Image (spheres, rainbow, N blue to C red):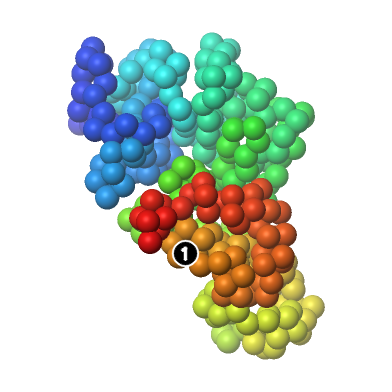
Amino acid sequence: MTRYVNIMPISSKRPIRFQTTGPLVVALLYDGLCTFEFGIVAEVFGLYRPEMGPGWYRFASCAIEKGPLRAHGGFALQPDRGPELLAKADIIVVPGWKGADVPVPERLCKQLRAAHVRGARLVSICSGAFVLGATRLLDGGIATTHWRYAAALQARFPNVRIDASSLYRSHNRVFTSAGSAAGIDLLIDIVRQDFGPRAANSVARRLVVSAHRTGGQAQFLERPVPVQPGREIAPLLDRMRNNLKRTWTTGAMARECKMSLRTFLRRFHEATGRSPGDWLVEERIEAAKVLLCEQPLSIETISAAVGFGSAHALRHHFRSKAGLTPTEYRSRFIPVSVLAK
């Protein structure tokens, strides 16, 4: 039996009526649509979230080719609009693509470039990076995709540096993510950029996922790590997150895991895709972001609370990782309710 999916209960012949007034997110529909990738876009941006207020995202689907269109799993698709909607979108998401060897229509590339010129953000999930690569908007920048497609993407677009280890990357308002689930990480980060950590945390809780997943694709490669009871990294990561104020040396970490320093460093990188120092700095920065937006605390107090020790150290690492000073970040993302305190 054919199953029909209409993402929004509106006729394609009537004006779109949104309950919210925020950025318009448009997800592309194509024949052979990657169902999971589209589903997470609709889940993050398309659900009614009254707790977010009237300024939350608007969402619609957009067919890039004539139908009938079907999604993976046998679903027939009924788009909200045709490609003309791309001219109005604030964020355009490419939820996967038909295949690494399937050409991208030049008409679509022109529409995406035009949207980017007027200020829209372009986002891809998994193999959707091939579509954004075809626009040439990634040239000279860094992009990522699923590690299985990384070599093909690099060969297709030699002017783009492919980072096969990251969960997501951005270049000039063009965002790419790794495997399907990494798309969730990217979309939550976009929510964080637009509405702050509190909103991102709320969406993550509803999805029952981490609001910020550190590490990279290295931890998901087809190379299993032997399990040794009492000698694993994950429990240590939890202890470090719960006690960021502590001075964590690599020697102390290795002892807690009952490993030699050399073995510990190798296992830590296998588990997280980075060094202990880099991982710890990122965790402290994420904790600082929450405090900056949810607590009217001084920079010195926040620095001590997350383990940097000095305001200077916090500012240095924060600018390096977030591209903003703590004060700039607070002024951009702090909720009105906190400012009123």
Res. 209 image quadrant: bottom left
Residue drawn at x 61%, y 75% is 304
**What residue is shown with label 1?**
296
**In this view of the protein, can residue 98 be seen by the observer?**
no
Q: Tell me if 50 is positioned left or right of 212 in this view.
A: left
Horizontal and vertical percent for residue 283?
59, 66
Looking at the image, which is closer to me, 336 or 171? Answer: 336
Residue drawn at x 43%, y 24% is 89
304 is higher (above) or lower (below) than 135: below
94 is higher (above) or lower (below) than 310: above
131 is higher (above) or lower (below) than 208: above
Residue drawn at x 59%, y 54% is 327
> Considering the image in quadrants, where does the N terminus appear?
top left
> Considering the image in quadrants, where does the C terminus appear?
bottom left
Res. 206 image quadrant: bottom left
Q: Tell me if 306 is positioned left or right of 202 in this view.
A: right
**In this view of the protein, can residue 340 be seen by the observer?**
yes
Horizontal and vertical percent for residue 62?
38, 22
Name the secondary structure under disc 1. loop
Q: Amino acid at mark 1?
A: Pro
Horizontal and vertical percent for residue 49?
27, 45
